[in-house]
Image (spheres, coloured by chain):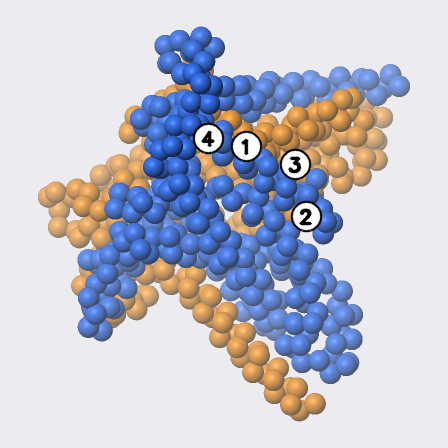
Amino acid sequence: MIRVIKWNWQYYLMLLPCLIYYVIFKYGTMYGVIIAFKDYNVKKGILASPWADPLLKHFQYFFSSPYASVVIGNTLKISFLKIIFGMIPPVILAILISECGNKWFRKIVQTASYLPHFLSWVIIYGIMIAFFSQSTGLINRWLTEMGFSSYPFLTDPAHFQAMIVGTDVWKGVGWSAIIYLAAIAGIDTTLYEAGIIDGCSKLKRIWYITLPLLRGTFILQLILRTGSVMDAGFDQIYVIATSQVLSVSEILDTWVFKEGIQRMNYSLASAVGLLKSVISLILVFGTNKLARKWDEGLW
Amino acid sequence: MVRKMKSDRALNLFIYVILSLVFVICVFPLLYVVSVSLTPISEVHKNGGFLVIPREITLDAYKMIIEQRMIPQAMKITIFITVAGTIINIIATVVMAYPLSKRNLAGRKYLIPFVIFPMIFNGGTIPAYLLIKNLNMIGTYWALLIPGAIWIYNLLVVKAFFENLPEELFESARIDGASEFCVLHKIAVPLSKPVIMTMVLFYAVGHWETYFDSIMYLPDQKMQTLQVVLRRMLTPNVDLNADITIPTMTLQMAMVVFSTIPIVVIYPFIQKYFTQGIMLGAVKG
């Protein structure tokens, strides 16, 4: 018994600095949330600033403003498009890689497919300029050579969201495939042997054995992504969007950043940020509950 | 039987074709950027863009980047942030994960939810900014190093790994009179090399790509990190070279390549940890 207490003493000594850090930086920001209900004044500070009148003034202001529907709409649209177009390709890639007989070739393709994950959005933006720039981009060069007129891919609102979703899929497909590759590696090989004995072709083995066994992983991934639907990807959109595409590029995170940090409407921006956090919290709990139905809960 | 073989062969061919396509789609954009940075753009376009090995190589753009000093300076800053930040991250994460992994830790029942909660609910951007401001960290590199010292997700992964280490190994050291710090340092950490290497990778990539924190917490342009400086250079019509005749595109692509070099150099060494890493992530916290 004495030994147990002695160990715990050391454990707490280890934990102490980290717990202080936690209280300041993780919970300290939660305390700051109250400025969403106040008229925050930089000079007075958080506590002394007067309460907003009515208390939900900033929320009401946001919802009665013209941005609310645009910003929320863009956030949801971009997120759902990313889920719709981003969920299937990693599964297909993982199956193709695992079914590829040549180990050496498999390794090379896999390594290449991870690479985009390690490129920052700024680098990817640079690559996009190389390909899509209206004056010097490669695609436009091809278009003009074939007799079409060049097209402003990067600054045209009609295609901005498609570009965002496309680059997101490109960046993530190889990395997301890893989890399915691991799931495939975990499948009992006797199932495939039984399939071969019964005369199943490779395609049928994929269809009747691999795919059904990947369903659990797929649903878990789907649920996890649905839980973070309020995050449409700040870095990506902030880096790629230009002022010409603002009507389709402004998402909750970029709006909060601009309104809060650049225009210094701290209380209004905090209110919108809080709204986002609360909806995310509900989504995470809701989707986790759903996931538990498939026995794949997060906690 | 013969028909079955035939259909398999068609499928195998299909697999090779699609995978080759995936390879090209992942690698070609980078190769193209490299060749644009090394070759006059007219030369690139003569071949319809399919110029993997440039014939007429000129390193002028790279020379200019180094002379201009803006990108190398930002890179120096970013390397410092990455190294210092990752060291802080790893120490903080490991030291916090170890006691939390102990089932006999008093109050563990309350500590674990306390630790996880900020992962699913946070105050948002503005309160975080005001906190850093009130701590007088705006405009200092501390703002990029300290607030993100622990990523909760990574903490949970390391904790899960520690939980799976056999307790008997620690027990023998304790009987020999080792303190818990000693056990952590001499036994737990060496046994956890794969997970720690994975965390080094995740944290280091995070620091290398830091963008948001840099624009938010570093108002002085001279202090900003590589990604921010690079993004500014990529703005259309930016005045990069008033007196030199290198085309903007060539110069911009050279900057992109130059900023990617560290990743490409380190990539082969860390590559073997990827799969392990993401699998550890799949372990429930």
**Callout 3 crowding tier (Cα within 10 Å): few <14, some 14–19, many ≥20:** many
| Alpha carbons under labels 3 and 1: distance apart | 23 Å
Q: Nearer the viewer, residue A13 or A99?
A: A99
Measured Cα–Cα span from mark 2 to mark 3: 19 Å
Give the amino acid type for the residue marked by disc 3 in the picture.
Answer: Leu
Q: Is residue A193 above or below residue B34?
A: below
A118 sits to left or right of B116:
left
Looking at the rendered structure, the kind of residue marked 1 is: Val
The residue at the point 30 percent across, 38 percent down is B229
Label 3 vs label 4: CA separation?
26 Å
Tell which residue pokes out farthest to the left in this image.
Answer: B243
> Is residue A142 rendered to the left or right of residue B165?
left
Q: What residue is shown with label 3?
A: B156
Decide: marks 2, 3 in contact (CB < 8 A)?
no
Quick one: SS at disc 1?
Answer: helix
Q: Amino acid at mark 2?
A: Ala
Q: Is residue B228 above or below residue A96?
A: above
Query: Which is nearer the N-term, disc 4 or disc 1?
Result: 4
Give me the chain letter of mark 2.
A
Q: Which residue is mark 1?
A: A278
Residue at which label 4 appears: A273
- The reply to whether label 2 and label 3 mark residues of one chain is no
Q: Colour of chain B?
A: orange
Judging by colour alone, the chain drawn in blue in this rendered image is A
Q: Chain of mark 1?
A: A
Using the image as rendered, state which of residue A119 and residue B118 is in the foreground: B118
* Residue hosting label 2: A291
Question: Which mark sits nearer the N-terminus, 2 or 1?
Answer: 1
Work out which residue is located at the far bottom of the displayed protein and give it. Answer: B2
